[in-house]
Amino acid sequence: MSFEPLASDFLGFETLLTDREKDAITGIRAFLEEHVRPTIDDYWERAEFPYDLIAPLMATDVGRFAWPETTPFENSAVFRGLVSMELSRVDASISTFVGVQEGLAMGSIGVCGSEEQKAEWLPRLASGEVTGAFALTEPLSGSDSAQGLRTTARRDGENWVLDGAKRWIGNATFSDITIVWAKDVEDGQVKGFIVPTSTPGYSATAIERKISLRAVQNADIVLDGVVVPESHRLQCASSFRDTAKVLRLTRAGVAWSSVGVSIGAYEAALAYAKERVQFGKPIASHQLVQDLLSKCLGNITASMAMCVRVSQMHDEGTQRDEHSALAKAYCTARMRETVAWAREAMGGNGIVLDYGAARFFADAEALYSYEGTREMNALIVGRAITGSAAFV
């Protein structure tokens, strides 16, 4: 199967990939078209996750490119971003699962874990043998997580005791381990812990009645005297600065995912416009519909360009927090415009799952808010360009 560039990659950014990376993208794209696209609307409508797809999905190059312990070939951050984009142009819930599994759970261990912890957990997470979750956000602490965490960690001999609550934790209803971030009562610093979800005192309850990312299994977590050994504390995480290193990587991934959501809605609208006949001709030949579609493509192209450059800076070692923050804030805002224009181009049919745009339109709202709201990311950028922090 040969690599076919996307028509929605208007400036040809995919040509930056190596031949091996193009082959990997081709395999991932084929898997998504065969196994995800035909059924995902039904899972989304029922608010269920296709658990049977986890192992085969992770057996593609999705699960094998993040860390040295799992990498079969050299690859670029642009490639990793394009994988996120490919996942999201088919379904943002599947992309979010991978983002939590590979970006947040594996990322926490890859960035903050000891060599022993990396060797133990990363290959198992990469294969899908073990599923992971990432628990930072709390019922009363979201944007102020750096200072406002209420979940506590107390040292007790060779163990730690965790108490508190977490909210909006993706994958948490079925994860085998959860990376829990808690404030050490002794020094007041945020630390990370690998918590097996079978540990007594740990419970996760699904959040229901969502209008966005319905297939994602978000949960409320309660930690009531959860005991974990010192060997499960992330050995290289000693403050929220270390947590932020993980978020820096995943924010860029969310920016890429938002491009994918934009493309998914745009492709659905374009296909619909070519087939839908009004006033005796396909609506694709009407000026106002072409205007909507060209605005969608402009947003997609500009956002992809920003994502490509931020990913290149990651490989160069020059990417900073403000770069990924700007990409996340800008690309998700453009995504919100794009999915609305795509839905508009489809008229009333744009709100029905059967026509392809409605799911992307709804899912965009979650991407716009998670991994740092637009406002918080704007303030990260503002601090960098003015030298003054304005968070409170």
Image: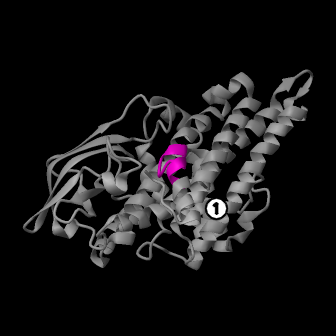
Against 260, residue 77 (above or below) is: below
Specify whether residue 363 is in view: yes
The answer to whether 255 appears left or right of 284 in the picture is left
Q: Residue at x 47, y 52 (%)?
A: 371
Residue 293 in the image: x percent, y percent?
80, 40
Q: Magenta segment: does it hold 324?
A: no
Front-most of residues 110 and 141? 141
Q: Amino acid at mark 1?
A: Cys
Figure label count:
1
Q: Secondary structure at mark 1?
A: helix
Residue 104 in the image: x percent, y percent?
41, 59
Front-most of residues 171 and 320? 320
Residue 73 in the image: x percent, y percent?
54, 76
How packed mark 1 is, by other alpha carbons closer than 10 Å (few <14, some 14-19, many 20 or more), is many
Q: Main secondary structure of the magenta part?
A: helix
Q: Which residues are magenta?
A: 368-377
Q: Magenta segment: does it hold 372?
A: yes
**Residue annotated with mark 1:** 307
Residue 220 in the image: x percent, y percent?
30, 40
Against 121, residue 364 (above or below) is: above
Front-most of residues 374 and 234? 374
